[in-house]
Image (tube, rainbow, N blue to C red):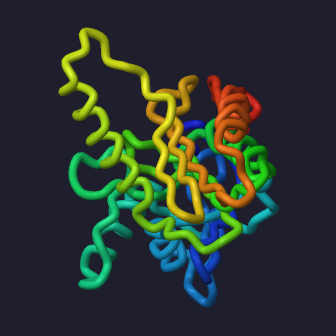
Amino acid sequence: MLQYEQCSCRLRIRERNRAGEIFLHQGRLVHAAYGSHTPRQAALEILVWDPIDVVLDPLPDLPAPSLQESLDYLLLEAARLQDERPSTPLSLPIGSSTGRLSSAKWLLPLNILRSAEELLHGVMELPGVSVAAILDRERRLLVAFKQRVTYPAQGLADRVSELFLAMDALLAGMGNATAPTVEDLLVTTTSEILMLRPLRNSPGFVLLTVFDRSVSILGLARTQLAKLAENFHPGPSSSSERS
């Protein structure tokens, strides 16, 4: 997590038609900006968004910190305030033992975020790809997401996690002495192919890709995705990411 890696950076975060910024200095949340909100109000809003795009930039020069409370405290306070809104489901920070996990993907280590963005950049260049996403199915977290068409990203990680749980139960019930390895799951419609591929170098992570059937060749697409997926192997964070 960025706070534990003591990272200093600015995160430009976009969710649907709104955007905000989070500023971290040595892992500590020091400022937030969103519209006309105060820094504290901005932080409480942004921390419970389900972002579709997060960009990490070097930390610009800032005046004295405008936020004194810890990131953990603000996450819990944001979740509490969101829970008080009748039309909005509860969103808790990563590590909470109950409730739905937060989609605050900027809390993941930088090496994972960067590797995910690089992988999706390559996937989106394949013929016919309209949507690509990387999900952490164990923590039910949308890590990275790119699209050329409108696609329902809200709750996507939850749906994928439930699908794999059902698949695991199905395979376990087949009575095999050794559990078979799932290479990918395919759903085909008259116009699209949806492919879910577990990333073998990083257990628990899944690559979701949606293809246009009129453009893509399934066999070739599977081979190309397998080759690209081999590059998703986030190692330990480097010391340069801690400054």
- Above or below, 150 relative to 126: below
Q: Residue at x 63, y 71 (%)?
A: 14
Which corner quadrant holds the C terminus? top right
- Measured along the vertical axis of the image, is residue 7 above or below residue 215? above
Give the residue at x 25% y 9%. Answer: 177
Q: Residue furthest bottom?
A: 36
**Residue 25: image location, x then y, percent:** 66, 52
Whether residue 155 sits left or right of residue 242 in the image: it is left
- Identified at 45% across, 50% down, the residue is 141
Vertical arrangement, residue 32 with respect to residue 8, above or below:
below
Residue 105 image position (x, y, % from top left): 53, 53
134 relative position to 82: left or right:
right
Q: Residue at x 54, y 64 (%)?
A: 190
Q: Quadrant of residue 221?
A: top right
125 horizontally vs 101: left or right: right
Let me know if residue 144 appears in the view: no
Foreground of the two, 136 or 128: 128
Image location of residue 128, percent across then percent down: 73, 57
Residue 240 shows in this picture: yes
Q: Looking at the image, which residue sits at the far top?
A: 177
Query: How many tags in the picture?
Result: 0
Q: Nearer the viewer, residue 184 or 20?
A: 184
Vertical order, 89 against 144 (above or below): below
Q: Nearer the viewer, residue 161 or 8?
A: 161
- Give x and y (percent) for residue 216: 71, 51
